Image (cartoon, rainbow, N blue to C red):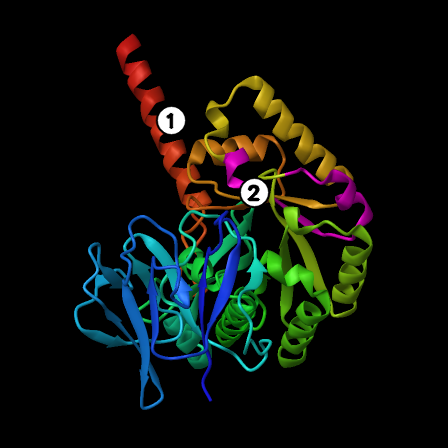
Amino acid sequence: MTKWVLEGFFGSNGDTLQRLPLNQFPAKIGRDARLALAIDHSEISRYHAEFFTERGELFLRDLGSTNGTFVNYQRLYGKVALRHGDVIHFASYEVRVLEEMDKDKDMDGATMTMMSDMPLGNKLPTGLNELQILLNERAVRAEFQPIVGLDGALFGYEVLGRGSRGDLPASPRELFRIAESMPGKDVQLSALMRDVGVAQGYSQSRTARLFVNTHPAELKNTLQLLATMQRLRNLYPELSMVLEIHEDAITDVKRMKRVADELTAMHIDLAYDDFGAGQARLMEMVEVRVKYVKFDISLIRCLHKAGKAKQKMVATLVAMTKGMGIQAVAEGVEFPEEFEVCKRMNFDLLQGYYIGKPRPLLDYRNPVRPMRRLWGLLNSIVQVEGKDQKS
């Protein structure tokens, strides 16, 4: 028998996400304390709405409430069949309806179950049902952003996942916002994007070096993460791969050392991503075998306009990184002036829109040499005009 639960910020404090089982139907919701689903909220009517079932489906209808009932931000008139993940507003009070999964604890007879702490802003995004379909259909695609040396020569590509369903955003940020609202979906989505991205890249070039991303939640179960990487290595034994891990996810040095050792045995390199966006974990860089450190865009953006103190700080961090035998990568290089500053600071590798935007094809063309020829031509013109003015 299908079991349904309401997920929301119930209780007096309203700061902890909880689940409330729907055990008996019809189930009225409102401000009246005698109701099974009583919510003490000034905008909710005494008898606001009602859940009921028909032919095994869960329905909701408004009971003539003053401030309205909304399903996925659309006002409800009459009745509507509900789906797993639908977001419901009783006036401004927000809940989400979920079909209980087999792995969840049986909640019959329970009154309320504590789930997890979540921020109060934008807490219950819509699209969970559509996301599950995306995961089942593996409906994602990849784009590839080039990573180059100081001479503009191609070094590798970062694999960037995108959604490919019309009823969901393509942006990974928005997809992960939906996925993070349901336990385990963020890990599943991250692994899927890696799998599809590597397969898509390998189909175009067996010699490309691919930098693949992780979600911080994957670091909570490193054995599972390593298993996904071993599967990729088995499928693509000759492919060069680099696993990127956000520096803020590195909280257990001993565990990370084991991860690094396992990756080394698979001939997969390790990179710290977004270095400098949070804590600069220099000691972890020393103790854990890592080959690349990717300096966050916040350090690189407008670096040519930054004061001497910031430029000196970045240059010092680059020198320290290289002194530990780690290659320093500048992310977010968008202008030729930033490129020149990064070159003077002796970064090893560069990535950003100035180098190349993410594209579905591995078709990088070196923009640095043509730009140098253009700058040379402009300098020649300026010098000629200067001589003409003097004569």
Highlighted range, magenta:
279-300
* Three-letter residue code for mark 1: Asn
Q: Residue at x 45, y 31 (%)?
A: 337
Horizontally, residue 368 falls left or right of residue 195, namely left
Residue tagged 1: 379
Identify the image quadrant of residue 139: bottom left
Which image quarter is the C terminus in? top left
For residue 172, say whether it is visible. Answer: yes
Residue 29, position as x, y percentages in the image: 34, 65
Assign a secondary structure to mark 2.
Answer: loop
> Which of the numbered marks, if any, corresponds to residue 293?
none
**Label 2 vs 1, first from the N-terminus:** 2
Q: Residue at x 82, y 54 (%)?
A: 254
Q: Tag 2: Cα neighbours inside 10 Å, few (<14), some, or many (≥20)?
A: some
From the viewer's perspective, is residue 302 above or below residue 153? above
Residue tagged 2: 150
125 or 390: nearer the viewer: 125
Assign a secondary structure to mark 1.
Answer: helix
Horizontally, residue 389 falls left or right of residue 182, namely left
- Residue that sits furthest to the front in the current view: 34
- Residue that sits furthest to the top in the current view: 390
189 or 67: nearer the viewer: 67
Q: Tag 1: Cα neighbours inside 10 Å, few (<14), some, or many (≥20)?
A: few
* Three-letter residue code for mark 2: Leu
Residue 82, position as x, y percentages in the image: 32, 75
Q: Is 299 colored magenta in this rendering? A: yes
From the viewer's perspective, is residue 375 above or below residue 161? above
Horizontally, residue 64 falls left or right of residue 118, namely left
Q: Residue at x 43, y 72 (%)?
A: 98
Between marks 2 and 1, how big is the CA–CA gap? Answer: 21 Å
Q: Is 311 colored magenta in this rendering? A: no
